[in-house]
Image (spheres, rainbow, N blue to C red):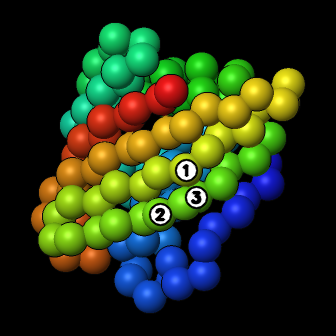
Amino acid sequence: MEMIVPKGCDNAPRKQIVIDFAAALLQKREDVIEEYADASIVWHRLKENETVNGLDLLFAASQAEKELGVACLEVERVITHGKFASINGVLTLADGSEVDFCDVYTFSSAAKSGKVKRVKSYRL
């Protein structure tokens, strides 16, 4: 999967974590997901009207993201503040269609070591 990330996303460690986590969900990279996610993570997938609870179900749901066939993840912005973060951009699928996305994150704490506790995904 190609990734286009704006310059300046490396000035805060949490920004790179958010980028890596978003890419891991799209690619079903369980090692990365497990590294950054809390065991009790909750993923709200609004387009699918679905709430996923816990790592095991998150791994299964990320398979559906992988099956979308994302050819390119283009990040427009990553914003972090305290224990909150968001990432938005465009997903280009293998068939050439595009999906605008925004994921809003809540971490377990504001510390760099804080784990992802909740993700709310918007897809258009």
The tag on residue 89 is: 1
Residue 93 at x, y = what percent?
A: 76, 32
- Residue, x 65% and y 54% (percent of image)? 74
Which circle's residue, 2 or 1, is located before the other in the chain? 2
The tag on residue 75 is: 3
Would you call the spot at circle 3 few (<14 residues within 10 Å), some (14-19), or many (20 or more)?
Answer: many
Query: What's the amino acid at mark 2?
Result: Arg
User: Is there a contact, CB below 8 Å, between mark 3 and mark 1?
Assistant: yes
In the picture as drawn, the residue positioned furthest to the right comes out as 95
From what the image shows, is residue 75 above or below residue 121? below
Residue 20 located left or right of residue 35: right
Query: What's the amino acid at mark 3?
Result: Val
Which circle's residue, 3 or 1, is located before the other in the chain? 3
Per the image, label 3 sits on a secondary structure element best described as strand
User: Is there a contact, CB below 8 Å, between mark 2 and mark 1?
Assistant: yes
- Residue, x 40% and y 32% (percent of image)? 122
Q: Would you name the residue on which mark 2 appears?
A: 77
User: Is there a contact, CB below 8 Å, between mark 3 and mark 2?
Assistant: yes
For the question of whether residue 1 can be seen, the reply is yes
